[in-house]
Amino acid sequence: MVMWYALVPAILTTLIGILYFGYQIMAFRTSELFNWHGQSFAYELITNILNFVQNNIEISVPLIIGAAIIGILFLLLPTLADASMIQVVARRRNGQKTGLGEGIKFGMLRFLPLFEYSLIIKTFSFVSISAEAAFIIRNFGPNAFNSLMPVLIVIAVVALILHILFTFAEYYIVIDGEGVMSGIVKSCTLVILNVQQTFMLVILMLIIAARILIQMMLVIVIPAVIITGLAFYASINLPEYGLIILAGISFVFIIFASYLAAVVHVFSVAVWTYTFLDFTDQELISAREKVEEV
């Protein structure tokens, strides 16, 4: 499942994440916070891209097509992969013989509702809120950021609560064929009925994710610093091969980091799918129902 459904989306997410993180660094570097008085980084970036396209039409066309394909894949492929994984895990849990290839077929049947839900949930994700906070502090300064800090904290807390309440929405959408709003409402109900177990499982998953993140830092960052230093030394002494060496090393580490992220994601989907199936199999006892004492 890692190779079929999770690795390519993880690679796309890692690459886009690197570009986004790099953009944020340069945007802060070229802001008034660092006494920058020229044009913004976004303006410079767009201007340089347009100039490059005008001066290199032959190269720009395939680059634009490739960037558009990557953008479309980044927008659509993770959602399709998640729908397929949930379908495969749920069907195998219930004893159905489902191949990995068939998972894509079942995933496509629930792709559009899940894609609609993903667009809703991303509007108050951690990345969205942090991007808004970064935009405020870059463009309006620390004083405005401090003034709006209580609002941002409230938004972050509300977003966290909604994420917990919506934990099982995508599983209702994919497994039970519910609509987006119906899945959200049923997810809130299921979380409330199993609030203690859900909360403990969220904490457990956060601890596991933090532990794996630390392992990734130890396994990737430390060797990366050493090897990058050696590659930089080679680039000085062997300038004709230095760029190739750095590109090759970067490619290897991106693939390795993406593979670890893919393993974690498959594990997370499996855990929450099993939890959803267990919770929904429980029968809710009515307050009017009499229970015989044993």
Image (cartoon, rainbow, N blue to C red):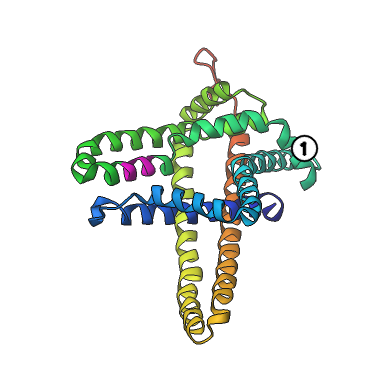
- Image quarter (top left, top right, bottom left or bottom right) of the C terminus: top right
Question: From the viewer's perspective, is residue 252 above or below residue 138?
Answer: below
Amino acid of disc 1: Lys
Residue in the image at 36% along x and 32% along y: 158
Question: Is residue 6 or residue 44 the one in the foreground?
Answer: 44
Q: Secondary structure at mark 1?
A: helix
- Is residue 284 visible from the viewing direction of this image? no
Which percent across, then down, holds residue 216? Answer: 50, 64
Question: From the viewer's perspective, is residue 261 above or below residue 107?
Answer: below
Question: Is residue 293 or residue 207 the one in the foreground?
Answer: 207
Residue 271 found in image quarter: top right
Residue 21 found in image quarter: bottom left
Report the residue that reaches farthest toward the bottom: 237
Report the residue that reaches farthest toward the top: 288
Which percent across, then down, holds residue 147? Answer: 19, 37
The range drawn in magenta is: 129-135
Magenta span main SS: helix
Residue 26 found in image quarter: bottom left
Question: Is residue 117 or residue 287 the one in the foreground?
Answer: 117
Determine if the magenta segment contains residue 173. Answer: no
Residue in the image at 60% along x and 72% along y: 248
- Is residue 131 visible from the viewing direction of this image? yes
Which percent across, then down, holds residue 124? Answer: 43, 35
Q: Which residue is mark 1?
A: 105
Residue in the image at 51% along x and 79% along y: 231
Which percent across, then down, holds residue 92? Answer: 74, 42
Question: Is residue 249 or residue 198 the one in the foreground?
Answer: 249
